[in-house]
Amino acid sequence: MARKSKATKKPAKKKAKTTTKRVAAKARRAPTKKSNKAKKSKKAAKPAPRKAKKAAPKKKQKLVGEGDYAASRTFLKDQSNFVKKNKAKIPAMGKEAERALDGPEGNSLRAAEQEAMSRSMIE
């Protein structure tokens, strides 16, 4: 009795699996190749696409009230610029305002302050 070696059995099995895989892969690929050719011919028949018009830029919505960020940024910028420009004058301005409150126009300044406070949301 002649024995078959293990080496001859394994390659035969591998070849059978590979050929089956190759055939299955070719079968899967075949329809896609045909559809690609069909797509190419349809694309050639279509006219060249027109350039899309640029959409008009959207206008930014303006937030008003406590959410008005643009006004807040402007206020903070103006305030810091005022302090930079008048850094040396600020103590003198404070003393001048104190004298004005103690002087004859003090009552009208306090009335203006009360009116402004009545309009504000801070109590």
Image (spheres, rainbow, N blue to C red):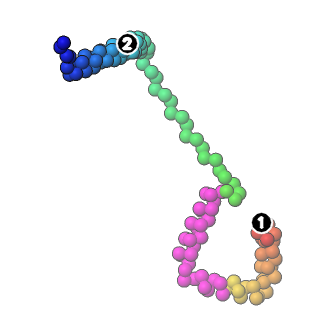
Reading the image, the residue beneath label 2 is 27
Q: Quadrant of residue 32?
A: top left
Q: Position of residue 85 (x, y in %)?
A: 53, 75
Left or right: residue 110 versus residue 68 is: right
Question: According to the image, label 1 marks what residue?
Answer: 121
Q: Residue at x 19, y 16 (%)?
A: 3
- Is 43 on the left or on the right of 101, as rendered? left
Q: Residues within 10 Å of mark 1 (few under 14, many from 20)?
A: few
Q: Residues within 10 Å of mark 2 (few under 14, many from 20)?
A: few
Please identify the quadrant where the C terminus is shown: bottom right
Secondary element under disc 2, as helix, strand or loop, is helix
Whether residue 26 appears in this view of the structure is no
For residue 42, above or below residue 10 = above
Residue 7 visible within the image: yes
Q: Are marks 2 and 1 in contact (CB under 8 Å)?
A: no
Q: Residue farthest to the front? A: 1
**What kind of secondary structure does the magenta stretch mostly adopt?**
helix
Q: Judge from the rendering whether residue 102 lies leftward or rightward of residue 9; answer left or right.
A: right
Q: Is residue 86 magenta?
A: yes
Q: Is residue 109 above or below residue 60?
A: below
Give the tally of numbered discs.
2
